[in-house]
Structures are given as C-alpha cells and as structure tokens.
Image: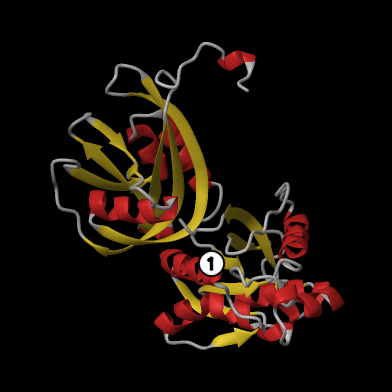
Amino acid sequence: MGSPANAGVSAESAPAVVRAAGAVLWRPGPGGRPEVAVVHRPRYDDWSLPKGKLDSGELAAHAAVREVAEETGFSCTLSRFLTRIGYTVANRQGGRDEKVVDYFAASAGRGSFVPGDEVDELRWMSTESARERVSYPHDVVVLDAFEALPAETTTLLLVRHAKAGKRADWAGDDVLRPLSESGLRQRDALHSLLPLFGPERVHSAPRTRCEQTVEPVAADLGVGIGPEPLLSEEGYVAAPEAGVDRLLRIAAAGGTAVVCSQGGVIPDLLTRLADAGGLDLGEVHSRKGSVWTLVFRRDPAHPDRIAGNGSGPALRLAAASYLDDPEP
C-alpha cells in the first residue's frame, strides 16, 4: 500500500531515476600535483567532468571507464569511489527526472583527445582551476571529494567469494567446496569488474571457492594466487590481529592487490581497520560476490613508523566503498 505522501501520484507522472557514472580523470602535473580533465560539450555549451548514462545491465564502474574513453580518448584505471550526486533533469515529456551519478577517481592511461560532436575541447588543469571552470556546483563537490585524499594512494580490493551452495549439501571436505552455477556467474561478473581497478597481485584464503572466485583475474595477469591462511575463517578467528596485520602487509607491498576472503572474516576485519583509521563505515555488508574497495595511506602523523606489531609500514584505512554482487 502506498504512503499518504504518494496518494494521487500516477505511475506515469512519477519521476524516473536516470543512472549515470563519471570520473575525475587525473594525471601527474607540474611539481607532482595532479591535474584533472575538464571537457566542453557544445550541445550545452558547458564545462564538466566526463560522465554519461549507464547502458542496460551496465555497472557504474564500467560506465565510468567507458564514458572517460568516449569523451576524452584516454583509457583509465579506477582507484576509488568518490561520491554520488543527485539532481533533476528535464525529460522529453516536459517533466523532470531524477539523475543519479556515481563518480570515481581514475588515473589516465594511454590515449589522446580527438574533438567530436559530443565533446569538442578537453583541458588539463589544476583542481583549483577546474573548480572555477566547471559549470555546475555538483562538479565542485566531486572535485572536493577527489582532493580529500592524495591522488597517489594504495588500493586493495577485498572480495567475498562467490556462491558455493549450502555446506550441508556438500559431502566432502568443506575446504574443497566449489562454486555453484550461480557462483560461476558471479565469478564471471567479477572477472569483468575487478580489472577496471588495475590489479597486479591476487591473494586468497586457501579455500577452493575463494580461489575459483579470483582465478580468472590471476590467469589474465599471469600470476599465481598467494595463499592467505590468516584470512580464512579459521585462521582469522584464531588470530584476528595477525589477520589485520597480514592484510596491511599485502596493501603495503605496492600496486593494487585483490584479496578473496570469507563472510566470517570481512566484517570484523573492516571494522578493525576502520576503527584504527578513524572511519565510521556503518553496517559492514558482505554479500557473496561483493567487493570492498579499500584505500590506504601512510599514517600522516608517523609516516616512517613501523606499525602494529613491528612488522610493516604504518598504513591507515583512508576510505572504503562497497560494491554489491556485480552479477546482472
């Protein structure tokens, strides 16, 4: 039953939600400071950050990378989710729709800009200059989110393994329980999503279902899957501080890493990391096939200190965002 606030509103007149995605595309600029791409659209005679509507069945991360390529000519690697912006836009029926845009930080790769009908000019500029150039206040909000952290950070993709059926229905050793048919579909969806963040290393709890979840990504990279017993449920429950330290060591090794773990590990692990970093993540979700993008930076108060139990650099969780099960 509809609420009183919706009484008298027909389905035809209810505003539609238009999903879109974009990115702050950046590259190292003079003096090591980042410069960001701002594009001009002749149809609207405006300056904006690259963005566009999601295609049918497309995830926001996929759309952000595609739109960057289409509007700027550059490939890119995502590092972190920045923010979600909502505003109304006119529709063809003369009404207003709600537009929701997810923005990511993205480092520029290879490419070159070619003017076209949709975008006829691209300018690289400092974030300060970009704030003055963009035509819309919501783009300033996105740039503020980008500047809240250094452009150069460390990203780790923490994955919960895909579906593997019910434990009670598996007669063998639970360590060997494989992915189910729906889990294989989730694995394929993750195989499409995770490379957008430029992973270089792959780690996994020593469980068949965990290893199968990230196996295609490792195969594409031509690397082995590093076994992580401290990030299995049994290993983590026995020594949670050691598990946290192990994840920090993986993050500190350089490059973006993928780590596949289990539902009995991820919520507590993230809570401990967030508490140490002074972040409030709220309820920590961890559906099978989901991904947490974790962004780390060195402890600004002690950049050269040895952290925790004396075995690694003082990394602190600086940001975290949750990407639900990517299977369409």
Residue 236, by quadrant, is: bottom right
The quarter in which the N terminus is drawn is: top right
Left or right relative to 316: residue 147: left
Q: Residue at x 34, y 34 (%)?
A: 134
> Relative to the observer, which residue lies in front, 114 or 314?
114
Spot occupied by residue 64 in the image (x, y as percentages of width and height): 37, 51
Residue 313, by quadrant, is: bottom right
Q: Is residue 217 above or below residue 5?
A: below
Q: Amino acid at mark 1?
A: Ser
Spot occupied by residue 194 in the image (x, y as percentages of width and height): 47, 67
The quarter in which the C terminus is drawn is: bottom left
Q: Residue at x 40, y 49 (%)?
A: 24
State the count of labels.
1
- Which residue has dot 1 on it? 182
Left or right relative to 239: residue 110: left
> Relative to the observer, which residue lies in front, 74 or 291?
291
Q: Is residue 323 above or below residue 248?
A: above
Q: Residue at x 51, y 56 (%)?
A: 80
Spot occupied by residue 278 in the image (x, y as percentages of width and height): 74, 52
Looking at the image, the residue that sits furthest to the right is 238
The color scheme shown is secondary structure
> Relative to the observer, which residue lies in front, 42 or 284?
284
Left or right relative to 215: residue 165: right
Looking at the image, the residue that sits furthest to the top is 8
Spot occupied by residue 304 in the image (x, y as percentages of width and height): 68, 71
Can residue 251 be seen at all in this image of the molecule?
no
Helix, strand or loop status at disc 1: helix
Other-residue count near label 1 (Cα within 10 Å), few / some / many at <14 / 14–19 / ≥20: some
Q: Is residue 9 above or below residue 21?
A: above
Can residue 176 be seen at all in this image of the molecule?
yes
